[in-house]
Amino acid sequence: MRIYDIIIKKREGDELTDSEIEYFVNGFTNDQIPDYQISALLMCIYFNGLNMRETVSLTKAMMNSGEIMDLSAIKGIITDKHSTGGVGDTTTIILAPLLASCGVPVAKMSGRGLGHTGGTIDKMESIEGFKTNLSKDEFVENVNKYKIALAGQTGKIAPADKKIYALRDVTATVDQVSLIASSIMSKKLAAGSDAILLDVKFGSGAFMKTQEEAFELAKIMVDIGNDMGRHTKALITNMDEPLGSSVGNALEVREAIRVLRGESGGALLSLSIHLAAEMMIMAKEAEDTKSAMKRLTESIDTRKAYDKFVEFVFAQGGNTDMIKNPELLPVGKYKYEVRSSIEGHVNKIDASMIGQAALIVGAGRENKESKIDPGVGLILHKRVGDHVDKDEILAEIYFNDKSRLDDAVKKVFDAIKISNAKISAGKLILGQVSKDGIERF
Ligand code: URA
Ligand code: CA
């Protein structure tokens, strides 16, 4: 087999066989095929696409390039959730203890944030002492004992995807639906859960800009998962404006604490409950959405979910005083209030630009080596549809480095559109995709 022939085949729009796909994935992972040939092949795939069989085959080859987690020592059905990027999306930190408090096991492996979207591991590490490098035994033991554990995804999971993604990132071949689907699913399948719930987002802050693209991506991922014997479902959700009001690591942990204590509601709570309800059903711990949502809501109202969060932080070595008194969590030294120059209604809050503003003050990574600043970020005071007076606060920016403020303020102003037109926020959950097909709500 020669990589040159595989490139020609895809250039001409022909189908690759399973063994050709395995050949290029393994050859590239083992450094036997150079970057430039895989770059050329990726560009052919970008233009000519992959059919479903090729996409499943690519997923399998990348999944099998590294370690496959065996979570069979954990009691119960393990469900995993994956969101396809988001801003102010703290759902994992809310739904994990929420599910655990209802007796549903949560064995969560998470990544770090890159670019304008935050990672759960980075957020949780803003809690002093919180340990995410659990050994396999500690991880399994904690889930069996507390029903919850969170660990950072190691480099041993799907190394082929890591290498291929790095190449896609610099060759303008990231946004191809089969490549995105196989990339995400190779890691999720290798992570060893029994069932997978996907939160596929669309809008300004997401990979997929339109609803239709999100349904298409979801359908492919759901088909891959079910094809490979894993119960997989997706919800299609709106990421036009940030989900919660806080963007930035410790600020998002604070917001999650407020939601878990029942002190904050809105889209963040609503989506967390919906996703958790689906996971509860997939774990066979509830019969239907209505009864699942009732139990989850009760768990928040009775503070069971919050108590579970405190226990979870304790179990992983974190300082629980920071949860009981969230003002002890890190916060930027300085605060700047962004105020509206006009009166009107909020028409748009561009999630991607808000994410970038948080990145500018140091909440995210510009590249893999950058260090994040846990206390910085911003808090939005308004949502789409809200009325604003002239000089009213739109957002607060928390920062440590004064030289970065002007750029961040400019981004926030660019992100928020205010006019006389009364506009209401779009629907939060647009539909679902399961092995039975697409259902629009
Ligand atoms: N996230 C991934 O892990 N892979 C992609 O290709 C896109 C988003
Ligand atoms: Ca099990």
Image (spheres, rainbow, N blue to C red):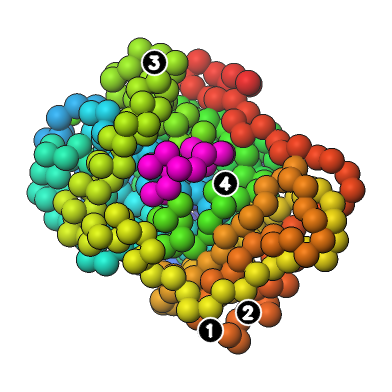
Q: Tell me the quarter of the image containing the C terminus.
A: top right
| C-alpha separation, residue under disc 4 versus residue under disc 3 | 25 Å
Magenta stretch containing residue 257, yes or no?
Answer: yes
Sequence-first tag of 1 and 3: 3
Sequence-first tag of 2 and 3: 3
Q: What residue type is disc 3 on?
A: Ser
Q: For ligand 2, give the image quadrant.
A: top left
Q: Which residues are magenta?
A: 256-269
Residue located beneath label 3 in the image? 291
Sequence-first tag of 4 and 1: 4
Percent position of residue 407, x then y: 68, 77
Question: In the rendered image, which quarter is residue 286 located in?
Answer: top left
Q: Are marks 1 and 2 in contact (CB under 8 Å)?
A: yes
Q: What residue type is disc 1 on?
A: Asp
| C-alpha separation, residue under disc 4 versus residue under disc 2 | 23 Å
User: Dot 3: within a 10 Å radius of its alpha carbon, few (fewer than 14), some, or many (20 or more) residues?
Assistant: some
Sequence-first tag of 4 and 2: 4
User: Dot 4: within a 10 Å radius of its alpha carbon, few (fewer than 14), some, or many (20 or more) residues?
Assistant: many
Kindly identify which numbered label has been placed on residue 243. Answer: 4
Residue located beneath label 1 in the image? 401
Residue under the point 10% across and 44% down = 141
Predominant SS of the magenta segment: helix
In this rendering, the answer to whether 37 lies above or below 71 is below
Kindly identify which numbered label has been placed on residue 405. Answer: 2
Residue under the point 64% across and 55% down = 381
